[in-house]
Image (tube, rainbow, N blue to C red):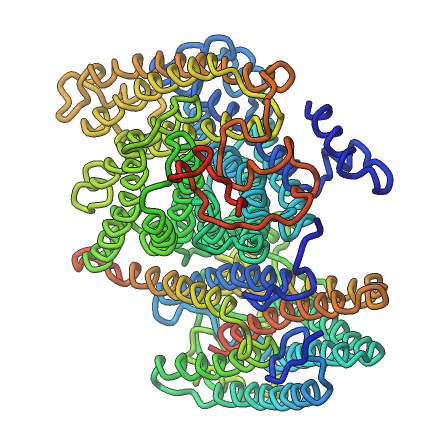
Amino acid sequence: MSNHSHSHADAHSHAPEEVAKHVKTYLFVFGALLVATVVTVALNYLHFDSKVLTIGIALLVAAVKASLVACYFMHLISEKKMIYVIMAFTTFFFIGLMALTVISYLDVPPETATR
Amino acid sequence: MQATTHTAAHHGAHEAHHHEPSFLQKYVFSTDHKVIGIQYGLTSLGFLLFGFLLMLCMRWQIAHPGETIPVVGKLLGSILRNMDGSLMMPDGKMTYDVYNIFGAMHGTIMVFLAIVPLAFGAFGNYVTPLMIGAPDMAFPRLNMASYHVFLLGGIVMFASFFIPGSAAQSGWTSYSPLATTVTTHGQAYWLVGMVLLITSSLLGAVNFIATIIQLRAPGMTWMRLPFFVWAQFVTGFLLLLAFPPLEAAGIMQLMDNVFGTSFFLPTGLAVGGRIADASGGGSPLLWQHLFWFLAHPEVYVLILPGMGIVAEVIANNTRKSLWGYKSLVFSALAIGFISFIVWAHHMYLTGMGTKISAFFQTTTMIISIPSVIILTCLFISLWGGSIRFTTPMLFALAFLPMFGIGGLTGLPLGFAASDIHLHDTYYVIAHFHYVVAPGTIFALFAGIYYWFPKMTGRMMSEFWGKVHFIGSFIFMNVVFQPMFAQGMAGMIRRMADGGLNYSKISHPDAIGGLDKIYIDLHTVILWGAVGLAISQIPFIVNLFVSIKKGKKVTSDNPWEATTLDWQTPTPPPHGNFTKEPVAHRNPYDYSLPGAAKDFTPQNQP
Amino acid sequence: MDIPYTSKPRPDTGIYNAKVGIWLFLASEVMLFGALFSAYILLRVGAPEGTWVHGMLNIPIGTFNTFVLITSSVTVVLGWAALQLGNFQKYKFYQAITILCALGFMGIKSFEYADKFKHYEVWLKNPVTVMHGDKEVQTNRVLGHIEYDGKHPYFWNTRTLREKGIEGFKFEADPYHYTLSPKELAHAKSVSKGKPHVVLDIKTADVERLSAFVPSHSTYFAVYFTLTALHGLHVLGGALVIFYIWGPGAKMWKSDPLRYTNRVEVSGLFWHFVDLVWIFLFPIIYLL
């Protein structure tokens, strides 16, 4: 098998030092996730007046946690372009589904609004 | 059936191998993409016929409301039962409920059990690995699983006809609250069936995309792929990303049906004159959004493989390369991408505001451009060609104007203003049937006649193929052309009496009542449908008889095609290629100046 | 010809087949859960002010479950790292923890579900007096637990009262209701900690509607149960696959260690996705 000099977290980075470095990263991310979870719940007790702020902050923390899992546990940060392309399109369509559905719901002719 | 040819090749390729696989392993639980492709093909053709027969019964009812259905009326009358066990149509006369059942299931079966499995499951499975030079699909066992889950879904859908209350009856679109509040269990069966079919498609899509990305033979770069493969690739992505929201919606509707939730039931809903016993707070529009999020990309799933087949057949039978290969590829990709953001053009009349309506109208207009580009490239590909009018070519040629009519008639539907008049009328039925029936189905017929010799080593009868073609072409137009006029006159869809109650025949003084001519056209359409049915008989006979009695091919490449699928033994053995093929050139090197023959296979250096 | 790139990566894409496959599958799962989240957003945005149920789930238990799932996520990737170093025993150890965490998660979820199924809301024809925190209020809608025949029954609803011929039941009322704002609700809960609950005597004739916290109670619970049940099915499915590879399928470590490691990686990717969904699910359903 070929030698990899770059730190790629694919199935073939078997150099022990590389794996040990990755393990350190995993444990650090684990700690960060636990802390972020505590932060999520703690922020919940703050009861902001603005609904937008509440939702925004909750989603922001969730997004940070999700990014940590995706980038480091799922190795997305060092993954190949092919995977990025697939996930980029998926993200676009997911946002499209959410956004366009909600906008369709909110954008109604003025005389017909029931809310 | 293929026992003779398949076993012979199988023995030849596997003499050194272990024991001979059993019948079950070879034909029922095979992981070979070619066997799976044929399994999909035969199953889907069976459902195509079944869906067609449902339609014949409906057209009879429309043209002769309240009269006993000939031939099958008594049979249906003895099978279909209500929830309390009584017969639904005891005297063989179609009731309105049975009409709705047949209508809902005709759409469902044609889209999900016939066309998609045939275009994607059958042709995609059989041809794609061969065309890219791969030994099989990337995940053969997953492939087998996807067929069996599809079969299970089909069985559930078919079985639903026979339960008390019979099958789903709220349209193939299953809008809530109707779909949820109908008291029969057919809808629950429909939802379970859909979950199975969606799962099958998802597994298939994963397989196709991974295979095309990973298993292309050396030298088979992306821009050397036959257009058929590009079409299947984009189709795979549409299935992968668009189906899950419908699965989610299906789960939610199942929750509504079985667990009494109110995902799609609004507050204050009244059913049968009483307030429904549900929490309310749901949104019928939510169902529509999630349904159409799939169902719009779904129509491109229906057409893209067909375009792929037509492209191959045209290149082969004009003896020249396709015109505008790059345009074709980028248009297919564009169609795939844009198809995800046009869906609400099916919902113009749901009370959306002008801004969001304008958005969807714009994207809908934009998506027509790549479709036209593809059609134009295919048309221009004919110019200067040495055209061979073989049966596959006849169907491929007819596809072009038929899809053209279907596509162009979609434009007034895509504009919100004109859609106000045309929405939910027979115009819509005519539009989408033109695209799928003389559109995709003709492309699929072309594919069957084209690849039959590779699968079986025999040609289908050219004579009966041409009879099949002429009959189908004429009668498809007889059936669907009048519907444009009916729709523009205001005839609404899904009327079990054919619109009689809204006509000047029943109500001579009614303003805006349908003129008698539009009702009379139903009789023309019925005769067209019967003619269409009769025209399929030579095809069905030809298909099965030719397996044993068709003219044997004299070479592995009887059509003298350039693509890799024809550079294999006939039929291709397990593993397809004895040694890994290498692609040395573009896929359509026909009539190269200075070449010995008028075609140069893709694996020729 | 054998299928290439099942273990070795394809040079131009740099990936082996199964990894492409699992990411494609995960893309479809993003759309699946995405659609459900979209449904949640639409239903919540469309709900009239003050009608959306909130604050009815046990946050400490949900938080603990989040820790459980995050832990299982790290053990899955540590197990894969151990395999890369050739340490099969360490992999077995870590993966066993993963499976135990999965079972723990499902167990806790089942407990949560059961708790919901005996927590009720009753809509009365005439208002009664209950406490919201330390305030007395007159209301038609009361949350709480049913006591009948010395037991706390599950899954009762309006129809059950009629079918079982029940004339009346005791109702231990909660000192809060979800129509209170999040701040008021939190205040009511904290102020009434440790204090005894008001017990009402409810006559069936006075009941407009009775429902446990089941999917049919409200669109909130419909979404809650559907999302968590679907997620739970994925936890179960993922755990089964990981268990199979860990147990019966472990023979492959001897015959084809690279392919085995890839299997562990691919199933691990699925597992992380399941964790990812929960990371969004938890704040959205439990906290917001």
Task: Name the spot of residue B480 as percent of width and height, x first.
Answer: 31, 24
- Left or right of B418, for residue B200: right
On screen, C19 above or below B419? below
Instruction: Indicate the quadrant where residue A14 lies.
Output: bottom right
Q: Is residue B187 visible?
A: yes
Task: Name the spot of residue B258 as percent of width and height, x first.
Answer: 57, 47
On screen, A59 above or below B536? below
The residue closer to the viewer here, B482 or B17, is B17
Q: Residue at x 76, y 66 (%)?
A: C260
Instruction: Indicate the quadrant where residue B587 lies.
Output: top left
Q: Is residue B60 visible?
A: no
Q: Quadrant of the N terminus of chain B?
A: top right
- Left or right of B588, for residue A11: right
The residue closer to the viewer here, A67 or B166, is A67
Task: Name the spot of residue B538 as percent of width and height, x first.
Answer: 50, 13
The residue closer to the viewer here, B509 or A13, is A13
How many numbered marks have been drawn onto this rendered protein structure? 0
On screen, B588 above or below C44? above
Q: Residue at x 26, y 16 (%)?
A: B521
The residue closer to the viewer here, B319 or C244, is B319
Task: Name the spot of residue C161 as percent of width and height, x first.
Answer: 60, 53
